[in-house]
Image (cartoon, rainbow, N blue to C red):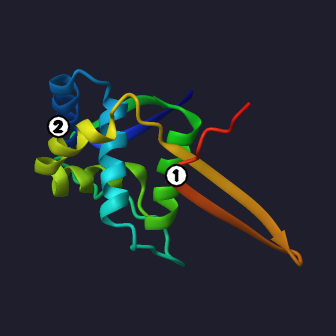
Amino acid sequence: MIRTTININRTTYQKLLESAHAKGIEIEDVILALMRYFAKKYKKETVSWEAVRYQERSENTSWECVHVAWFGDEYEFLIDLRKIHKKSVSRLIAEAIIQFDEKLWLYIDSVLDKNQDHRYLIAKFNVQNIIGCLILWDINIPDIPK
């Protein structure tokens, strides 16, 4: 497990907590469901050559430092979203809560099916001294016979 923290405004935190309590799951699972939904909805959006954008700061906003823990593939997925969309994970969460609040309830059950395996693969390659990396999310790898 990779342990880290995310800083989110108190309103976003409350919505995440309410969703987690209503579904009987951890806040990390709600965040993953939200981010998987975000990734599917915005799969064509990529941003290059820009700085990462963070949440808007306001003097009137209360912030929560939330301690979270994810498996390596889950953590890498979130870091990939940060890289591709050029937004901090905290900003992605806040934007997704605003955009998908109603639909998230419908999506959580399918994303967090405990029998569903979210496979993740990073393939690194070198062709004529050009180094590349291919990232695959939610792939279906058939079981390899023993």
- Residue 15: x and y in percent read 17, 37
- Residue 54: x and y in percent read 38, 58
Element under disc 2: helix
Q: How would you rate the neighbour count of disc 2 (Cα within 10 Å): few for under 14, some for 14-19, many for 20 or more? A: some
Q: How would you rate the neighbour count of disc 1 (Cα within 10 Å): few for under 14, some for 14-19, many for 20 or more? A: few
> Residue visible at 32% across and 42% down?
33
Front residue of 100 and 139: 139
Front residue of 62 and 124: 124
Quarter of the rendering occupied by the N terminus: top right
> Residue visible at 41% across and 50% down?
89
Which three-letter amino acid code belongs to the residue tagged 1?
Ile
> Residue visible at 69% across and 35% down?
145
Which three-letter amino acid code belongs to the residue tagged 2?
Lys
Q: Is 46 on the left-hand or right-hand side of 62? A: right
Q: Write down the residue under mark 1.
A: 139
Q: With respect to residue 133, does 80 lie above or below?
A: above
